[in-house]
Amino acid sequence: MSDKMRIKIFSCIMLTLFFLCACRTQSVYAKEKITVGTNAEYAPFEYLDSDGNLTGFDYELLEAIAQEENLELEWKDMPFDSLVGSMETGNIQIIAAAIGPTKEREKSVDFSDVYYTGSQSIVSSQKTPLYDFAGLSGKRVAVLEGSQSDFIVSGENTDYGVVENATVVRFKNAASAVMELKNGGVNAVLIDTIMAEIYCRQNDDIVYQKVDGTEEDTVYCIEKGNAELLNTVNKGLKKLKDNGEYDQIYEKFFSGENDTTQVQIADNTGIIGTFKFIFLQDNRWKYYLNGLQVTLLVSIMSVLLGTVIGLMAAMIKLNADRKKKETVLSRIIHIYVDVIRGTPSVLQLMIVYFAVFHSRLGYVAAVVSFGINSGAYVSEVIRAGIMAVDKGQQEAGRSLGLGYKDTMRFIIIPQALKNILPAMGNEFIQLIKETSILGYVGIMDLTKASSYVSSRTYQMFIPLITAGIMYYLIVKILSIFLEKMERRMRQSD
């Protein structure tokens, strides 16, 4: 393959990736769907059922509104603190996440009519109960990051009262905040009263106290300036309230007869009962199976993409080294490798998903992000493997009358493979573990699955250690395979 052909192939690959990224918004908007952002870790407002499907009060109410007004909704599960930012960039048109209207949010979004009114409550240990904001003074207080409770404790919102000198401990979901309280990591949790009622009803060692004067409305956030969508949602909500369907949905989730969080059933049933409770009840083992499939699929596709990118990048750099002359493309490759190796993979994933793919096609965005990340490391692995071959081998090929390409093909590359393949195997192993950050963009990988099971069962050790064992087994199997491959390569020397 000529140098020009390699450059053309690499350029085509990179242009294709950027073209897909640039066209993503237009292709999705062409479907004329209303994209709804939510955070499915806040039962009973929004959460996943036993089959992994999105449900909850917010979800069913908005779906009922959509049916009433002939709207088609596309739901996107993402971190709570990313919702408003995603709406500002045009990635979503509605936020359904039990959000209260604030002056700060009003700058970025429009608010629907009120569909629920709640309040704030302090959840604390039964042994050391706390009753008001004064009691939180100087304490460690857990909150849901970006929520109203976060604004209150941090002092950004003083309309409901002042919490002085408290240490704010932020979590991505309310269940983790409650677990931190139960483990003694914080003195209290400030959350919505309905959530406090559910958690305390199902945990005997914690209590809650509603804070007077913290009553707040809950609304859907609508894309700023989208008056047509705002009017449509408000009109549909009014219809549901008038025909009684709103009351039916409300009763379904707030009557207390069908709790969406789980009781500590397993406390006195032994180890077998605990495992049955964690994995078999509500078919929670399916989360692990699905998470494992996602982890392996994203890893395999990413390493394949990374290998193609890395091979092209390595050839371009090697060609520049051989000619002892930097080209524009080799300089671009150098910058690419330097930037990717110098920035965290989680940051790269969030940029690709939120800024490039606009919170759409999560799996494609993940593969592109990890593939680009892997390509930078693979390029250096290939380059180092080829350069590790003794220069005398190339001279020997030339002395036999072989050209540069034939020398590389028949002499250099076969020897370099012995250095490259083990390192490539290690890159694949590393990539499998790196996929544990997929939860940052709402993808249910193996780590995210264990975290979700923990939030539903109030059991932290077993769900997390199970995911750890699964990762270990995957890595161990791959390591054994790599060891056998290296052993066979050594025998051929």
Image (cartoon, rainbow, N blue to C red):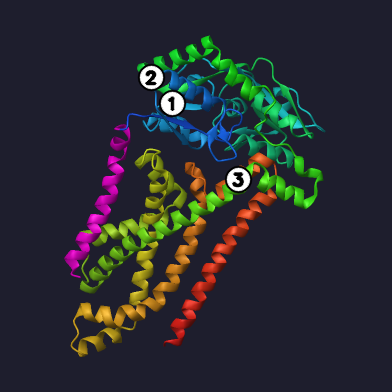
Q: Which mark is residue 229?
A: 2
Image vertical order of residue 259 relative to residue 17, above or below: above
Residue 7 on the magenta segment: yes
- Work out whether mark 2 precedes mark 1 in sequence or the reverse, and give the earlier one: 1
> Left or right of 178: which side holds 336?
left
> Left or right of 450: which side holds 209?
right
Quarter of the image with the N terminus is bottom left
- Please provide percent x and percent y for residue 23: 27, 40
The secondary structure making up most of the magenta span is helix
Q: Residue at x 27, y 66 (%)?
A: 317
Is disc 2 surrounded by few (<14), some (14 to 19) or many (20+) residues within 10 Å? some
Q: Are marks 3 and 2 in contact (CB under 8 Å)?
A: no
Magenta region: which residues?
A: 1-30
Q: Which residue is drawn at 51% across and 37% down?
A: 79
- Please provide percent x and percent y for residue 405: 21, 77
Q: Do the residues labelled 2 and 1 touch (CB within 8 Å)?
A: yes
Camera-nearest residue between 90 and 262: 262
Q: Which residue lies under the disc numbered 3?
A: 451
> Which quarter of the picture shows residue 323?
bottom left
- Please provide percent x and percent y for residue 363: 42, 47
Q: Can residue 158 be seen in this view?
A: no
Give the structural element (helix, strand or loop) at label 3.
Answer: helix
Q: Residue 94 carries which label?
A: 1
The residue under label 1 is which amino acid type?
Ile
The residue under label 3 is which amino acid type?
Ser
- Work out whether mark 3 precedes mark 2 in sequence or the reverse, and give the earlier one: 2
The residue under label 2 is which amino acid type?
Leu
Give the structural element (helix, strand or loop) at label 2.
Answer: helix
